[in-house]
Image (cartoon, rainbow, N blue to C red):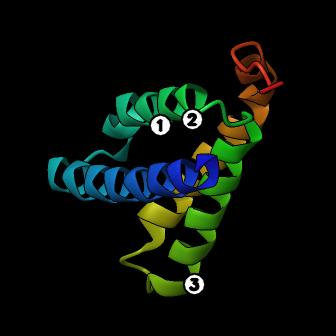
Amino acid sequence: MAASAAISGMAEANRRLTGSILSALKLGDLDFIGPNLQWLEGMMINHNLPPTVLCSFLKAYHSAAAQHLDAPAGEPIVNWLAKVVAECEAATAQLADHYWPAE
């Protein structure tokens, strides 16, 4: 049952990130997504997922975007995602402070 909740949570994370990217593009600044990334972090903490899961999710999203979004139109998204992945990896140690492994 825990695996089902994690999969459902990842599907919700995917929908939210996609919607956030589309909204930020309409507003002209992908950095407007920041609060929604904090929501993703909170969701993963709430599901008691290790902090590395958020970075892995963002890496996979970045990889898919790089593969499927054509240049030059997709470059802003791919570049923004690369920046977010790097920031996530740098912050993983801080995220670990909020994670308590299930016993």
In this view, the residue farthest toward the front is 1
Image location (x, y in percent) of residue 98 = 69, 15
Q: Secondary structure at mark 3?
A: helix
Q: As drawn, which residue projects farthest toward the top?
A: 97
Q: Secondary structure at mark 1?
A: helix
Tag 1 residue: 40
Q: Which mark is residue 67?
A: 3
In the foreground, 46 or 52: 46
Callout 2, which amino acid? Met
Q: Is residue 18 above or below residue 85?
A: below
Label annotation for residue 44: 2
Q: Are marks 2 and 1 in contact (CB under 8 Å)?
A: yes
Eye-nearest disc, 3 or 1: 1
Mark sitting earlier along the chain (3/1): 1
Which amino acid is tagged 3? Gln
Q: Is residue 33 above or below residue 6?
A: above
